[in-house]
Amino acid sequence: MSSAGKGGARHTPKPQVDVDLLVKCFTLHSALIQHCGPYENISKTQACNPKGLFLMLPLLKGLLDLEATCEIHGSCLRQAIFQVLVQGPSLNDSKFNGSVWVGSRVERISVVLFHMRRLKGSDDMKACASRLTGAEFLQLQEVVDMIAKKGSPSTELALVALDKREDGEQEPAIRKLKKEVSDVSLDSQGFPKSLKTPEKVETPLLKGCKPGDKLPLLKGDTSEAEPVEGEPLAEPSFKRRRKGQLAERQPTEEEKSNMKDALGLGKVYKRPAGKKKKTSKAKAGSSKASSPLVKGKKKIANPNRKPWLKLYMTQTKKPPWRAYLAGTTQKGGKKSLIVETTARNHPKYKEIIQLIKERLEQEHITKHEALSLRAELYSSM
């Protein structure tokens, strides 16, 4: 038995088994290779089928004798099943060619092996006990106990190192992470120093000064610091000024006039001619004058609108249930669809179409207004 190429950090390669031994095993159980029973239509993501696993027990025992981890590389399975197919071509009783049939058999056997490994590492045996008889469950339990758990990559490296040490060879060096102790520095009270509030600097250094030099007096400062000889006192930056530092200094007349000119207060602008205000009240007797409606009176239709000469309301007698209005505003004109209501949009579609028809007859509303009225009735009723 040998191992295939490396995978990820936690991946252990599937073991490769001698192809000739697999051919002997598959030849003895060729009927199970040809038809896997319930496992013809079961994938890895589905739950284990206890009846199907019990049917495949003779083949599983032969494979466990060759590899106790119940895990075999796919290339070995493919080569072995292809040789069995060459010896017995009648095994392929499907409509597919030989390579496709071999691929399907490899996939079926891989699913059976995967479900057996899942039974070994989980609590799925409870479901098997509920679906099998006592004798069948004992046989399945016996085969599951034959499966050996596969070790982690570090365990396998340690076993290889132990075998080489017993044979007298040099022990291979196993890479390990470097251990570094990084204790957190604590203060006298036991709190981390990284969480300590930084100390405030009382007198910040000015630009160009070094620690230990005499600082020049700032404007308005009454401290006893001695000025630096030979250098005039420069006005401090606005960032270092204290609040109210320039409050005593008053602007000169020249500065005031410059400020007025800059703000535009010194110039005299001509006031623009006033515009007449528009009166909102309409003249008496004008056609646009509107009078409020008296309670109890109906709104009179606009005389400028074209009245509907012919109005037809139609309702369907079979699904889809709907009702629609058609009409025309011209004498002898062809009627056209105005508005339509359906039971899918509102259960009271008949009442809604009746209300729209009344508005069309009384107020002569347009087609666009009828569609807007339909949307309002859909939301309000």
Image (cartoon, rainbow, N blue to C red):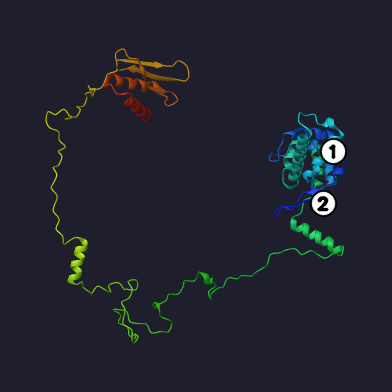
Q: State left or right for residue 248 relative to residue 218.
A: left
Going by the numbered disc 2, the residue's amino acid type is Ser
The residue that disc 2 covers is 2
Residue visible at 77% across and 65% down in the picture: 173
Is 111 situated above or below 262? above
Is 313 situated above or below 73? above
Residue 258 rendering spot, x and y as whole percentages: 20, 67
Residue visible at 21% across and 65% down in the picture: 259
Is 222 situated above or below 367? below
Residue 57 rendering spot, x and y as whole percentages: 82, 39
Q: State left or right for residue 135 relative to residue 317.
A: right
Quadrant placement of the C terminus:
top left
Q: Quadrant of residue 293?
A: top left
In the structure shown, which secondary structural element does the residue marked by tag 2 occupy? strand
Give the number of callouts: 2
Q: Which mark is residue 235?
A: none
In the structure shown, which secondary structural element does the residue marked by tag 1 occupy? helix
Residue visible at 80% across and 31% down in the picture: 92
58 or 145, which lies in front? 58
Residue 170 rendering spot, x and y as whole percentages: 83, 65
Q: Residues within 10 Å of mark 2 (few under 14, many from 20)?
A: few
Q: Which mark is residue 83?
A: 1
Q: Earlier in the sequence, mark 1 or mark 2?
A: 2
Q: Residue furthest top?
A: 332
Q: State left or right for residue 297 relative to residue 332.
A: left
The answer to whether residue 138 is visible is no
